[in-house]
Image: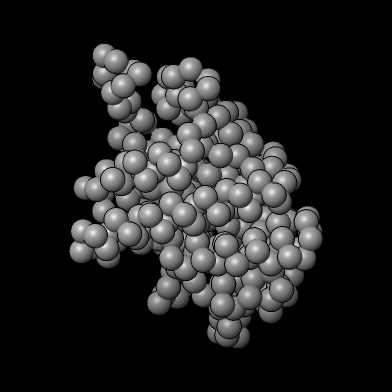
Amino acid sequence: MTTNAETAPVPVGPGLSMFDPIFVGIDEFGHPVYITLAYRNLLAGGEPGGGKSGLLNTIAAHAALSVDSRLVLLDGKLVELGQWEDCADAFIGPDITAALDILRRLQLVMNNRYAWLRAHGRRKVTPADGLSVITVLVDEIAYYSATVGTKQEQEEFVALLRDLVARGRAAGIPVVAATQRPSFDIIPTSLRDLFGYRAAFRCTTPNTSNIVLGHGWAEQGYTATDIAPTNQGAAYLIAEGGTPKRIKVAYLTDTQIAGIADYAAWIRRPRPLPTLIPDLTRADFEVAA
């Protein structure tokens, strides 16, 4: 515990870290399944109601309770990740202008971190550096890339997101993104292959399952079309260089999410309201310096 909450660091959660393995569910044999997200990104795709939001909320819970994490949330529907708003440095709703602004700021933070790493002869951020892992969660890529805003804004969103996914993980800025429209126009191969983890929830066709997992997996028997519509939370999870694994994603009820989020917000924000939303670029660069 600290005696001066205004100037001293405040412990967050029960000692969790974004560099720790994150529990996401169980496999078909009942064994726990963990992912390590700090140096990887995760893409979740599948039809509505398949369980993608359950996966995002499980990861958000771990991030909110981690001592070294900051959250940036983009949720076009406002309600899927909305309960974590008070735990986040930034919460973006159905506003393409705000979404582009936060991605530009994150890009600058990423560039600052790489400049710092280069100055110290390093290639990636480690827990010993004292830099927070900025976890970016995007619920429904298609909303920002194909629905709202002008074509130019949509293309800029895709370009910024691709850059963040491509370069962010070594700088401690992992991206977790979900879409209920797994198609080549929403998830081009050049973007999909940048995600170290990919989770395919129930899909309507083998082709859409392949768009998430990678070309050819459906033909080898790993297709999310065989997931029953009533089996919410079931998915095929693949890590880069691995084989798809059938899992059942952990599920948090709205009441459980509210309890965790309330606790996380209470321990994260003991300061007056005006100081709760720091400038990501300036604050992060000052820490790195």
Q: Quadrant of residue 15?
A: top left
Compare residues 246 and 22 and report the one nearer the observer.
22
Tell me where residue 93 appears, x and y as whole percent.
Answer: 69, 42
The residue at 55%/54% (across/down) is 104
Total number of numbered discs in the rendering: 0
In the displayed structure, 178 sits above or below 10; it is below
In the displayed structure, 275 sits above or below 211; it is above
In the displayed structure, 93 sits above or below 118; it is above
The residue at 47%/68% (across/down) is 166
Q: Can residue 274 be seen in this snapshot?
A: yes
Q: How is the image coloured?
A: one colour
The residue at 57%/62% (across/down) is 161
Tell me where residue 276 appears, x and y as whole percent.
Answer: 50, 27
Compare residues 204 and 269 and report the one nearer the observer.
269
In the displayed structure, 8 sits above or below 213; it is above
Compare residues 195 and 102 and report the one nearer the observer.
102
Tell me where residue 227 appears, x and y as whole percent.
Answer: 65, 65
- Where, quadrant-wise, is the C terminus in this rendering? top left
The residue at 38%/54% (across/down) is 112
Q: Can residue 226 be seen in this snapshot?
A: no
- Where, quadrant-wise, is the N terminus in this rendering? top left
Compare residues 172 and 140 and report the one nearer the observer.
172
